[in-house]
Image: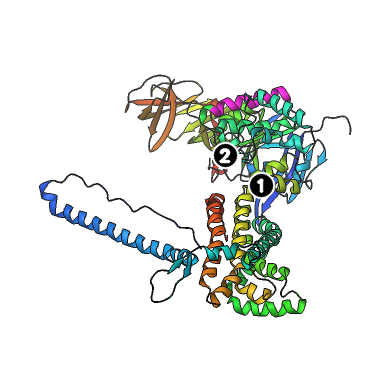
Amino acid sequence: MTAPMWSSPTRVNALPTLSPGQAPSVLRLRSWSLGSTILKIIGLAIFAFLLFGPLANLVLWSVAERWYTPYKLPVTYGMRYWETVFRPTGDAMASLLTSVSIACLTVMVALVVSVPAGYALARLKLPWRTALMILFLLPQAFPSVAIYINVARVFYGLGLTGTITGVVLVHAAHGLVYSVWIAAAAFAAVDKDLELAARNIGASPLRTFFTITLPLASPGIMASAIFVFLESLDEFTGTFFVGVPQVTTLPLLLYNASMGGNYQIASITALILLVPSVLFMLVIERFLKADVLSKVGQ
Amino acid sequence: MDGTVLPAIDVDHLQVSYGSQQVLHGVSLSIASGEFVAILGSSGCGKTTLLRTIAGFQKASGGSIRLSGRDVVNVPPEKRGMAMMFQSYALWPHMTVLGNVGYGLRLRGVPREEIRARVASVLKMLNLSGLENRKVTALSGGQRQRVALGRALAIEPQILLLDEPLSNLDAKVRIQLRSEIKSLQNQLGFTALHVTHDREEAMTMADRIVVMEAGRIAQVGTPKEVYDQPASPFVASFMGAENTISLDVTPAGSGVQIRADDGSMASCIDSVPIGAVTAYFRDDVASLEDPAARIDGSIILPGRITQRTYPGGYYRYVVAIGDRHFSVTDDRYHELDRPVGLRLPVASLHLFPTEQTKGGLHA
């Protein structure tokens, strides 16, 4: 899920004026740089195709009302399926709402854990600091299906399967690695002297945290919240094991639609899922500064 | 209370360690109310640690710190009633100048209008009027450090701690701020404790100078005392007496006779150590004379000029005597490679027994 990153092809450097004796080597140089430019263009074209080819296919499918073999392009175009999806009573809108609510709740749960945990990891001299950091990484380190089958079993015993709470908890556990690691880096990037300056002229530790440390770390924490939001919006496996059949999120709808051979609905769902990702990636780029990124995982 | 005036800061046998490494080895220092004291030392001597321990940022492992008689060793920094200026300015980039300077007042529950008025008067005092709503990131280095000074002074502290606040500024701004801080101190009467590695800064600003060496106090005194009567070879070389020469002192009559290796000698009646001594002298103490001259109370060493520079106002020469080189300033112009006599007035030399000077040279 990366935003497109275009770099303009490097221009061939202007060659110095040649003297007769130099001609052959300059010629070789020129053909060499011409060759490398062509290679770059080909590379970029392949990259663009890999990135935009699937997207173009999605767009095409979303407006194809009839498309079957042997035709290379849809037989009839139309917006019928978009109307189906956006019909107020449709499944798609309901599951979009579910997805967004779950994502928001997940962000809240993750922040409640990651702000204190991140501060503690960044500022206090904790024994087992590395072990704690790795603990948050664990949910990502094992095959997710194995984990979620067990989680589902435990949640079933607790009566959490099929509930929003259960799904939010699964998503939060998954998102914590981002939010805790990024929050720890964001707090570590705040210069300690800035806190000491506040303490020095009379601010209590709590007051210092809320007026100095937290505001200065907030861009990094915002970025971590966005990551968690996007991860939750996209999450499939955990939702599938814990939420089905009562909780239907967009990725589950997408899965059902494509399993049922309804490529139009599946494509439209995928396109909808893409919108927040691209938007937030643009925002994150502004929030996550180099000084924070350099401290991630330290 | 017995009626005597208690010192504003009284540090008694203060010890500080980072892990197993001891940084301060029992420092004792007493600072009177309204005094300006500079702690001078090379990097790693513990001067910043001393200041930060007084501020409460660093835990003491032994000893006591009393502020006007109140023991504060276990008091958190926010309850010590001080203000500090940092080398890094430590201004809060997410606040305006008003937000920074008014922060301490806001903590004290001062009404918004009064904060505005008091910040305005502080800024006026610092020639920053009208910059209230400017982001601190949009200010120059000198302006930022002035805002930091304003933030510290806005709460009208009894004690101002200065942690090398001028060392990141360029020379002109630094000298300007030096005198501004000094005159504000005279005007407002707070006690100031200033950490620096800049000798001239310490000399011009402080009433008293504390020279620190390797976690201990090497000498405490007025700028003149420390400059003219250094208590140890370390202090002598730190105060600029970087030329050294071995001399031999023998008792003679009512005084002593001081003899250099090449036989030139002078007599003196001051109390000086007897035996092998090392003399420390600054380049402005020595002067250039005729090699054959005989002057009372001075040793004349014959040598040769190997280098001449003009820093402005006077010439600075490097004189080679044997295989040793000495740096000397002199008002007069001399040709290079000319034989000269290096004149050392005995009264201005700092003499220390040679054993004491061994290993004591790291200025």
Label 1 resides on the chain identified as: A
What residue is rendered at 61% in x and 66% in y?
A92
Q: Is residue B26 visible?
A: yes
Q: As drawn, which residue projects farthest toward the left?
A: A20
Magenta region: B173-188
Q: Position of residue B315 (x, y in %)?
A: 41, 23
Q: Which amino acid is tagged 2?
A: Phe
Q: Which quarter of the picture shows residue A52?
A: bottom left
Residue B209 visible in rendering: no
Main secondary structure along the magenta-highlighted residues: helix
Viewer-nearest residue: A234 or A18: A234
Measure the alpha-carbon separation of dots 1 and 2. Answer: 47 Å
Q: Residue furthest right?
A: B2
List x then y, in percent, for residue B102.
71, 33
User: Which residue shows up at 49% across the image and 24% down it?
Assistant: B298
The quadrant of the rendering that contains the C terminus of chain A is bottom right
- In the picture provided, is A123 more to the left or to the right than B344? right
The residue carrying mark 1 is A215
The mark lying in front, picked from 1 and 2, is 1
Amino acid found under the numbered disc labelled 1: Pro
In the rendered image, which residue does mark 2 sit on?
A: B234
Tell me which residue sits at (79%, 46%) in the image: B75
Give above or below for A145 relative to B305: below
Q: Nearer the viewer, residue A68 or B237?
A: A68
Query: Which chain letter goes with mark 2?
Result: B
Quick one: label 1, few (<14), some, or many (20+) residues within 10 Å? some
Q: Are marks 1 and 2 on the same chain?
A: no
Q: Residue at x 58, y 30 (%)?
A: B143
Residue B168 drawn in magenta:
no
Q: Is residue A64 above or below residue A33?
A: below
Disc 2 is placed on an element classified as: helix
Q: Quadrant of residue A44?
A: bottom left
